[in-house]
C-alpha cells in the first residue's frame, strides 16, 4: 500500500508539472480572435489575439500577437521610440511600409521596425493574410505615436528600401546541436537596437531532436509555424503543434523533438540587458 501511495504521488506530481508547462504554452485559435478596426488609424479590419505579453518572460520581451489581416485591412503607419517590432506574414502577400517607403513582400516574410522608425502594413489583396507581430523594448513599457496614414494606394518601390527577412526552408543548414535538425539565423543582433538578439528559423525532422541547452542571459520565445512534436522545459514534456507559442525564460533548460510531421519553429532571442546583448553581438561578429 505504501509503495502504491508513493507511485500515485509521483504520478500526480508529474501530471501537475505537465499542467504547469501546458498552462504556459498558448495556442492560436482563429475562433478566439477579436475583430479590430482602424488599428493605428489603418484601413479596414483585422482579427487579433495575444499569445504572450510583458509578464510572460523576465526580459524586455513585450508581446507576441497573432491574427489575420482581412482583405483591405491593415495597420496604419506609426512610430515606436522605446521599443521595436516586427510584422511577419506567414502566407500571401502584403504591403509593408517603413519610414514612408512601401514595398510588397510575399510570405512567409517580415520586416523589423527598429526604434525611432515608423512602420505600417496593408493587405491590398482579396484574400486574408496570416499575420504576426513581435515587440521587444528598452523596458517593459510599450509606446506608439500614430501618423494617421493608412498607406492605401501608396507608391511602391520594386526593391524594399528597408531591412526584410524571408523564412526560406531552402536556406536552412544542418545544425550540430541535435539530430535531424536544420536551422538558420535569419536576423542577428546587429539588426536591433533593443536587447532583441536574434530571430532564428529551425526545422526538426520526424523523430529528430535538439540537445538540451540552458542560457543564463537569454530568454527565448518559440512559435510552431507548422508540424508537431514535443518540448521539454526543466524536465517537463508537453506535446506541441502548429499555432503553439512556447516561452523559455532565462535559466530554463529546453529541448525539442519532431513528431509525425517536420516541426518548424521560429525563435525570438532576447538578452537580459544591453551589456549582455553587446557581448553576444561581439561574439557573433568574431564568428563571421
Image (tube, grey):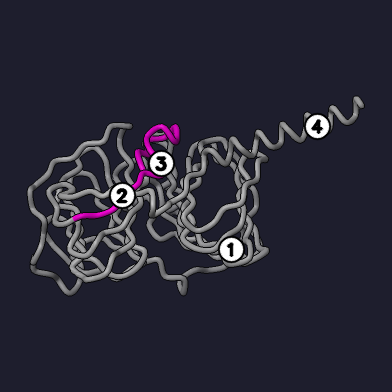
User: Relative to 138, does residue 243 appear above or below in the rendering?
Assistant: below
Q: Is 26 displayed left or right of 165 in the figure?
A: right
Instruction: Give the labeled residue for mark 4.
Output: 8
Q: CA distance from mark 4 to mark 2?
A: 42 Å
Stretch in magenta: 45-63
Q: Position of residue 228 (x, y in %)?
A: 57, 60
Instruction: Give the labeled residue for mark 3.
Output: 52
Q: CA distance from mark 1 to mark 3?
A: 23 Å
Nearest-to-viewer mark from 4 and 3:
4
Say whether marks 1 and 3 touch (CB < 8 Å): no
Q: Residue at x 58, y 39 (%)?
A: 21
Earlier in the chain: of badge 1 and badge 3, it is 3
Q: How many marks?
A: 4
Say whether marks 4 and 1 touch (CB < 8 Å): no
Q: CA distance from mark 3 to mark 2?
A: 13 Å
Q: Position of residue 5 (x, y in %)?
A: 85, 27
**Quarter of the image containing the C terminus?**
bottom left
Badge 2 marks a residue whose secondary structure is strand
User: Relative to 252, does residue 131 appear above or below in the rendering?
Assistant: below
- Residue farthest to the top? 2
Instruction: Give the labeled residue for mark 1.
Output: 204
Q: Position of residue 263 (x, y in %)?
A: 56, 62
* Residue 238 lies in the magenta stretch: no
Q: Position of residue 145 (x, y in %)?
A: 13, 41
- Asked whether residue 288 appears in the rendered view, the answer is no
Q: Residues within 10 Å of mark 2 (few under 14, many from 20)?
A: many
Nearest-to-viewer mark from 3 and 2:
2
Where is residue 105, by image quadrant? Answer: bottom left
Badge 4 marks a residue whose secondary structure is helix
Q: Is 56 displayed left or right of 141 in the figure?
A: right
Earlier in the chain: of badge 4 and badge 1, it is 4
Amino acid at each position: 500500500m505504501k509503495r502504491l501511495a508513493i507511485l500515485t504521488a509521483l504520478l500526480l506530481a508529474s501530471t501537475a508539472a505537465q499542467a504547469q508547462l501546458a498552462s504556459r504554452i498558448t495556442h492560436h485559435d482563429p475562433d478566439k480572435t477579436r475583430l479590430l478596426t482602424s488599428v493605428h488609424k489603418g484601413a479596414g479590419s483585422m482579427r487579433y489575439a495575444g499569445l504572450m505579453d510583458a509578464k510572460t518572460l523576465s526580459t524586455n520581451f513585450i508581446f507576441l500577437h497573432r491574427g489575420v489581416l482581412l482583405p483591405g485591412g491593415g495597420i496604419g503607419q506609426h512610430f515606436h521610440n522605446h521599443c521595436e517590432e516586427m510584422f511577419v506574414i506567414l502566407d500571401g502577400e502584403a504591403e509593408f511600409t517603413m519610414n514612408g517607403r512601401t514595398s510588397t513582400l510575399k510570405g512567409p516574410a517580415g520586416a523589423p521596425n527598429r526604434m525611432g522608425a515608423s512602420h505600417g502594413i496593408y493587405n491590398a489583396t482579396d484574400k486574408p493574410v496570416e499575420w504576426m507581430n513581435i515587440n521587444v523594448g528598452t523596458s517593459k513599457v510599450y509606446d506608439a505615436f500614430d501618423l494617421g496614414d493608412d498607406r492605401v494606394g501608396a507608391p511602391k518601390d520594386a526593391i524594399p528600401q528597408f531591412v526584410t527577412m524571408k523564412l526560406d526552408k531552402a536556406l536552412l543548414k544542418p545544425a550540430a546541436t541535435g539530430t535531424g535538425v536544420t536551422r538558420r539565423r535569419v536576423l542577428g543582433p546587429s539588426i536591433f537596437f533593443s536587447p532583441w538578439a536574434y530571430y532564428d528559423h529551425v526545422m526538426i525532422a520526424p523523430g529528430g531532436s535538439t540537445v538540451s541547452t540552458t542560457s543564463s542571459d537569454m530568454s527565448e520565445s518559440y512559435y510552431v509555424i507548422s508540424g508537431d512534436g514535443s518540448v521539454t522545459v526543466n524536465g517537463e514534456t508537453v506535446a506541441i503543434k502548429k499555432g503553439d507559442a512556447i516561452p523559455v525564460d532565462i535559466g530554463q533548460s529546453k529541448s525539442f523533438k519532431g513528431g509525425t510531421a517536420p516541426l518548424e519553429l521560429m525563435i525570438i532571442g532576447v538578452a537580459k540587458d544591453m551589456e549582455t546583448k553587446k557581448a553576444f553581438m561581439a561574439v557573433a561578429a568574431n564568428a563571421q
